């Protein structure tokens, strides 16, 4: 059974071997740039691990692993454009480096190639189903991104609506990555669905934790500025739950703070104090832990060797057990 480190190396080699070298370079250079600047490769690793649960010949799943990583990076290119972001993984974003038009076109090409790469799957009989799975994931990711945009100007957003948004924007691709890998490995329909649900719940837990760490994390370990979501008036699950619990005076104060762009340090400090007063950190920890435990329960239901499932669980834990 291959270790996570070996699977990572195998994927990186496959990625290098399948680098797109063709004209016009102005279209494909941005494509190769975003694929080369790192990242945890979490989605392709989950795809390969899911395949390995049922078939140790992980070559069956390498095309799907590359497909989900290309799709993921396509979404990042377009997200960065919409967010007007300057950096991605510590590097200049694609649209800043190559220009807006090239970034849009390269992102479009990446989306198309993510489907085309599935055609290289050795078991030709499952390609149609793979394309169907990726298609369902893709439309949900787009819907989730639109909900996220809508939330920026919306009011009275419920926690359930927010959780649905992050499920579609983040969690469904983790779910799809696992389902594609399991399909490549010959898993039963039931096992595929358990793995998909494990991925969905893990994705929710991860995003909830990410929201928490943005306000309460250790800046030396989190890798981003603490309080960035507050400074940018992002309506995360912390903010939404705080509005739900706050009395009239505190709610008015929160709404006022999230409609100003004054002293950011004062704003971050004040909002953080309100969150603590309302016991938001404890609520978020409980919510994340609930999704995490439900995810592990789904993994336990998968009919596969315990040792192989432990690798997937450990990889998820590396995401979920950081600073919370």
Image (spheres, rainbow, N blue to C red):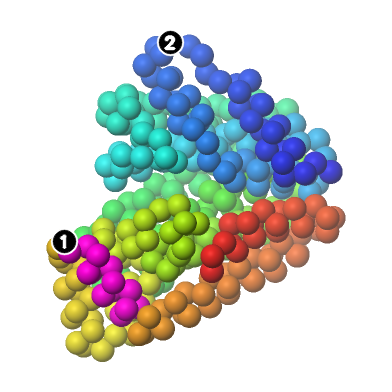
Query: Which residue shows up at 26% across the image and 75% down it?
Result: 270
Q: Looking at the picture, how far across and down is residue 26, in whole percent?
A: 36, 16
Rounded to the nearest angstrom, the CA distance separating label 1 from label 2 is 45 Å
Q: Quadrant of the N terminus?
A: top right
- Image point 36% across, 84% down: which residue? 278
| Residue 112 spot, x, y in % from top left | 47, 28
Q: Quadrant of residue 273?
A: bottom left
Mark 1 crowd level (few <14, some 14–19, many ≥20, 10 Å Cα): few
Q: Is residue 55 left or right of residue 292?
A: right
Q: Earlier in the sequence, mark 1 or mark 2?
A: 2
Residue 265 drawn in magenta:
yes
Q: Secondary structure at mark 1?
A: loop
Q: Is 319 rendered above or below residue 83? A: below
Q: Residue at x 51, y 14 (%)?
A: 21
Using the rendered view, name the quadrant where residue 44 is placed. top right
Q: Is residue 127 visible?
A: no
For this view, does 222 lie left or right of residue 227?
right
Tell me what residue is drawn at x 43 percent, y 59 percent: 219
Magenta residues span 263-275
Looking at the image, which is closer to me, 214 or 198?
214
Residue 291, image x and y in percent?
Answer: 57, 70
Q: Which residue is mark 1?
A: 261
Circle 2 is placed at which residue position?
A: 23
Along the viewing direction, whichever of 223 and 81 lies nearer the viewer = 223
Let me know if residue 302 appears in the view. yes
């Amino acid at each position: 059974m291959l270790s996570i480190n070996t699977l990572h190396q195998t994927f990186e080699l496959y990625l290098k071997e399948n680098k797109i070298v063709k004209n016009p370079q102005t279209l494909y250079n941005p494509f190769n740039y975003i694929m080369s600047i790192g990242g945890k490769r979490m989605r392709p690793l989950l795809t390969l691990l899911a395949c390995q649960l049922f078939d140790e010949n992980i070559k069956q799943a390498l095309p799907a692993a590359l497909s989900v990583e290309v799709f993921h990076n396509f979404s990042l290119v377009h997200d960065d454009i919409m967010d007007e972001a300057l950096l991605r993984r510590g590097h200049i974003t694609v649209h800043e480096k190559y220009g807006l038009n090239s970034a849009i076109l390269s992102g479009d090409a990446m989306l198309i190639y993510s489907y085309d790469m599935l055609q290289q799957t050795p078991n030709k009989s499952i390609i149609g189903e793979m394309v169907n799975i990726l298609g369902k994931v893709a439309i949900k990711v787009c819907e989730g991104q639109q909900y996220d945009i809508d939330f920026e100007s919306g009011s009275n957003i419920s926690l359930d609506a927010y959780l649905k948004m992050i499920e579609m924007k983040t969690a469904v691709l983790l779910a799809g990555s696992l389902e594609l890998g399991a399909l490549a490995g010959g898993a039963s329909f039931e096992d595929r669905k358990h793995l998909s649900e494990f991925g969905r719940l893990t994705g929710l837990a991860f995003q909830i934790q990410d929201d928490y760490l943005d306000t309460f994390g250790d800046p030396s370990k989190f890798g981003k500025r603490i309080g960035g979501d507050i400074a940018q008036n992002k309506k995360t699950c912390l903010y939404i739950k705080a509005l739900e619990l706050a009395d009239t005076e505190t709610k008015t104060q929160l709404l006022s703070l999230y409609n100003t762009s004054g002293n950011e340090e004062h704003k971050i400090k004040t909002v953080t104090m309100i969150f603590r007063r309302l016991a938001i950190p404890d609520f978020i920890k409980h919510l994340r832990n609930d999704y995490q435990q439900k995810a592990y329960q789904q993994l336990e239901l998968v009919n596969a060797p315990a040792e192989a499932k432990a690798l997937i669980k450990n990889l998820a834990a590396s995401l979920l057990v950081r600073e919370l």
